[in-house]
Amino acid sequence: MSTRTLIQGGLVVTATDEVHADVLIENGQVAALAGHLTDTARSWTADRVIDARDRYVIPGGVDAHTHMELPFGGTAASDTFETGTRAAAWGGTTTIVDFAVQSPGRSLRAGLDAWFAKADGNCAIDYAFHLIVSDVNEHTLREMDRLVAEGVSSFKLFMAYPGVFYSDDGQILRAMQRASGNGGLIMMHAENGLAIDVLVEQALARGHTEPRYHGEVRKVLLEAEATHRAIQLARVAGAPLYVVHVSAQEALAEVAAARARDLPVFGETCPQYLFLSTDDLAQPDFQGAKYVCSTPLRPAEHQAALWRGLRTNALQVVSTDHCPFCFRGQKELGRGDFSKIPNGLPGVENRMDLLHQAVLDGHLSRRRWIEIACASPARMFGLYPQKGTIAPGSDADIVLYDPHAEQTLSAGTHHMNVDYSAYEGRRITGRVDTVLSRGHLVLDRREYTGRAGHGTFVPRSTCQYL
């Protein structure tokens, strides 16, 4: 049976346009747009009419970097696919791209199947997968070809975490060479893990055990060095490169220099690097453990460079790296040894709101907000125009956003399955009002109407910037 929904009277904001328009949705897709109060719009009829006056009508957010249920450091991320995707929907995100993990000695397929088992039937919004490649060998290289053809077209490697996810330069080069032939995109966690481990050992030997030393040993120069090395390896391989969670001015400079030479190098940053700093990591009484993530938080003076990088397109995407661990019982595993604090922050619910605050603060335009949070991640990872925009034929993943509502971010009101907020007490303006996923109401005037199992797996094409 055909179902039609009409969204009337809002300001439609995409990465390219701002227009007062009505949006007609039919069978889960955008059917048409027409100027508000035009004859065309007046002629439309629908089963459901949504009043969008005084609201922005924006594409649902695409968060291209999440870690639901990720095992790490003897524990696991506290958000399941059910709780994490519900929280994402509350925050205006309608698609996540999560990371399936290959276990050393196992196949890529086994890792992907394990993540399908976690996600299938449990997600409130649509989802896709990247693959973390932990064991580069001839078998896994051949598997990469098949997975790209099946819609899993991006592969993450780590220059950090020796003994866990780490790949050496030879393995990285082989994976990049394979990606250069099959159209895949290599994503890189760029930190010099071998050098960091030396500095960790030396810090602990000096009795430096508090959370703030996590940031001090993971030095800016070791992020910049690894970023430079990753770029040069990608050049040798003739492969594109996407550098995840760029946190510091020096690493950003490496990405920007590569892009100035027209190299296919892309960069992502995260809200924590734009809004938090080493001051948070240094909070007393072990409270700084809440802010332990990798790459680490940096001194606040790096933020201006990151905002500038977002405005100039040296950085293309803002994702969350959502990987929550509760303070009690999880972050506390690192009392007396910062190296045992699980690495990760919650944020999937906060990204769209924080970036809207950045619009109000003058860091971004409205269209750039939508570009870095919706359209660019969709293009980067082969989801556009199905996701990331509002256009005829696109999925009706649409958010009604109240730009005037005021809120205070708090663990007491968020929906992520974690016992603290990284932004506790921060007052911001702007809030998600209503969310549709493929035309289905998931959030209706701040009332949750979604369900686990509505979200479906979305196969992806290859990077659309290449």
Image: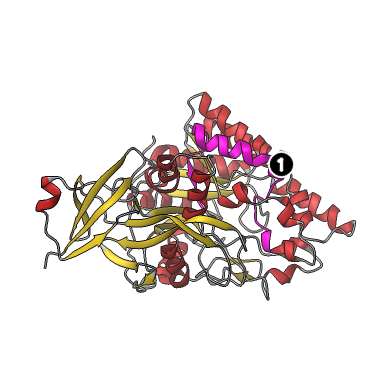
Relative side of 203 to 108, left or right: right
Q: Which residues are magenta?
A: 290-319
Q: Name the residue located 65 percent from the left edge and 36 percent from the top edge.
A: 249
List the residue tagged with mark 1. 220
> Residue 338 location in percent, x, y?
77, 62
In the shown orientation, is residue 130 left or right of residue 305? left
Asked whether residue 30 appears in the rendered view, the answer is: yes
Q: Does the stretch in magenta take in 166?
A: no
Q: Nearer the viewer, residue 323 or 36?
A: 36
Q: Residues within 10 Å of mark 1 (few under 14, many from 20)?
A: some
* Above or below: residue 461 compared with residue 115: above
Q: Is residue 149 above or below residue 316?
A: below
Q: On the image, which quarter does residue 288 sit in? A: bottom right
Q: Quadrant of the N terminus?
A: bottom left
Q: Quadrant of residue 326?
A: bottom right
Q: Describe the element under mark 1 as helix, strand or loop.
A: helix
Q: Position of residue 133 (x, y in %)?
A: 52, 53
Query: Most extreme residue toward the bottom, as rendered?
Result: 329
Front-most of 17 and 295?
Answer: 17
